Image: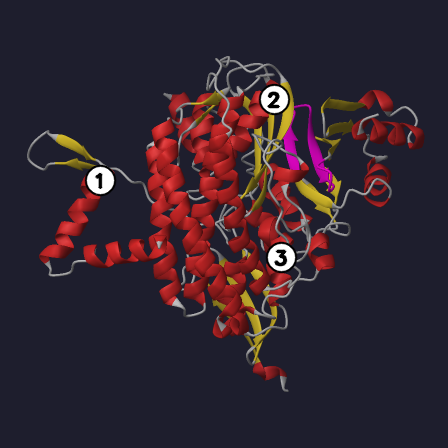
Amino acid sequence: MTVCENIRQQLAARFPGIEERVKIPRPRRIFVEAAADEFRKIFEFAINELGFNHLCTITGLDERVNFSLIYHLAKENGVLLNIKISVSHDAPQADSIIGYFPGAEIYERELVDLFGIQIKGLPEGLRYPLADDWPKDEYPLRKDWKPKTAQAQEGK
Amino acid sequence: MRDSHKFKIPIGPQHPALKEPEGFSVALRGEKILGVDIRLGYNHRGIEKAAEERTYIQSLYIIERICGICSHSHSTCFAQAVEEIAALEVPKRALYIRTVIGELERVHSHLLWLGVAGHEIGFDTLLMYSWRDREIVMDILALLTGNRVNYGINTYGGVKRDISPEQAQEVLKGVDILEERTKYYIEIATQEVTVIQRLSGVGVLSREDAIRLDTVGPTARASGVARDVRKDDPYSAYSEVPFNVITDDHCDVYGRTVVRLKELMEAYKIIRYVLKNMPEGPIAIKAPRKIPAGEALGRYEAPRGEDVHYVKANGTEKPERVKVRAPTLANLQAVKHMLKDRYLADMPIVIAAIDPCFSCTDRMISIDYSGSDKSEAIKWEALRSYGIEWYRGKGIDFSKLNKEFSRRAIS
């Protein structure tokens, strides 16, 4: 049994019904879709019992009906566990994970600046990566946001 | 000590000691650093958004320009993710060529770092030496790819240029000289008392903190964490190439120096092995213009550490989402930790020790003659001989000295 299959079975044993939401597209890659309310449990299980000790990054996605966040976790043998959760498009909000990975702070600030997703538990601090005078309520990685030059070209 | 002795000084975003714009706000009591706030984003160019609005092949070139030093890292990492989604079987020879370029890039990047590190501790002779030697690997890269930086060798499904046996011979010749020089630098780093004393115990990061703060690359490996994507999650030809992951347990800037120097020796080994065992065959297969829907994660061990690219495709000719996490971003949290309760004077070398990325320049200059519509592109050789002649005209001639140095380096 491969390492990934093993992890799939451990997840299935702990979280009944999750099995069809676990995908293994290639060796060393696992994608899991988690419901918002079970995310923290799966996340803690991955860290404490499956031994994932490295957070590669957090990816934000604008899927138009909702936003998604993907937490990319890694461990020594090269296996990547990608846990995906969905958050509402109208009032996007997620919990901070800096309690588990202090390095996540900069990735969470990115989500705040580029997607406008509120991160609960993220302390006040310097913004990243946009400029201090960037207009409010403009989130460049949202799909309905276009740069001014593109807007001007389309207007012609 | 009274609290009135507390100071907050801004360093950057524009500052003579920084090679790139970034803002540090340092709280000090006397010479001791109480805490550091880092403001980034001055180099934010919206590349992720730009990639979403362009075709895959255009995006490949934009992604390559994220960084002027580890450009091959970014383009390979991105291409790997796209190839995985499109289920493209990259020919073996192409994977081997990517590995050669990747390791040559590591060599030039580590030599560049060595020079910067020397400069930051006031050892500018080391800067002059290592940057002169770095020219050898820059010439090799120009020979193989046509470019000193932003090599443009990758394409989806393979590479764009083959390596001929004659070119391989040239590479090996250069690698021989570089290996000799690197041995000399290892001698300096491990025997020269001023270097050892200046770097030891500076920028300390324990093994536990290195893991807890998610550090990557030589920064993690110098704290005893054997984290290397080439071994853990092999790509290109690394699963078939014998090499060692270099770690060190000094947990300070000295350890980071030793790790990078020893990695240079490993890189030479890898380059020799790959050139010797390069399989025959095609160097690329045709890739479709439209990439089927899907998602993939590319990982790559850049000179500075793990580079991560997430790509989501939607079946069109443009990517739905491209997410890039460059290694420096992962290491910056650790820098804050390393600086706390240390002396201000250590700040430049501690920051330099994670090797934050800065840009190189292009090798080709386009000249528009004023008053006529003639324009001409100067080749690198012509530009170089122009420079040499210009200095000779001023009575400065390095050619004898250079010959002497390369003779000494080989013997």
Q: Secondary structure at mark 3?
A: loop
Which residue is denoted by mark 1 in the rendering? Answer: B381
Q: Is residue B52 visible?
A: no
- The image position of residue A125, as x and y in percent, is 63, 56
Q: Identify the magenta region.
A: A58-78
Q: Which residue is at a point 44% across and 50% down the rendered structure image?
A: B179
Which residue is denoted by mark 3 in the rendering? Answer: B222
Q: Secondary structure at mark 2?
A: helix
The image's colour scheme reads secondary structure
Identify the mark nearer the N-term, 3 or 1.
Answer: 3
Q: In terms of secondary structure, what is the magenta stretch mainly?
A: strand
Q: Vertically, is B3 above or below A34?
A: below
Amino acid type at circle 3 is Ala
Q: Which residue is at a point 64% across and 87% down the rendered structure image?
A: B1
Instruction: Residue B10: give its label.
Output: none
Amino acid type at circle 2 is Glu
Which residue is denoted by mark 2 in the rendering? Answer: B84
- Chain where mark 2 sits: B
Which of B14/B154 is in front? B154
Q: Which residue is at a point 45% across and 55% down the rendered structure image?
A: B182
- Chain where mark 3 sits: B
- The image position of residue B294, as x and y in percent, is 64, 19
Q: Is residue A134 left or right of residue B165?
A: right
Q: Is residue A76 magenta?
A: yes
Task: From the image, state whether disc 2 or disc 1 is nearer to you.
Answer: 1
What is the spatial separation of the Cα atoms under label 3 and label 2, in whole angstroms? 32 Å
What is the spatial separation of the Cα atoms under label 2 and label 1, in whole angstroms? 39 Å
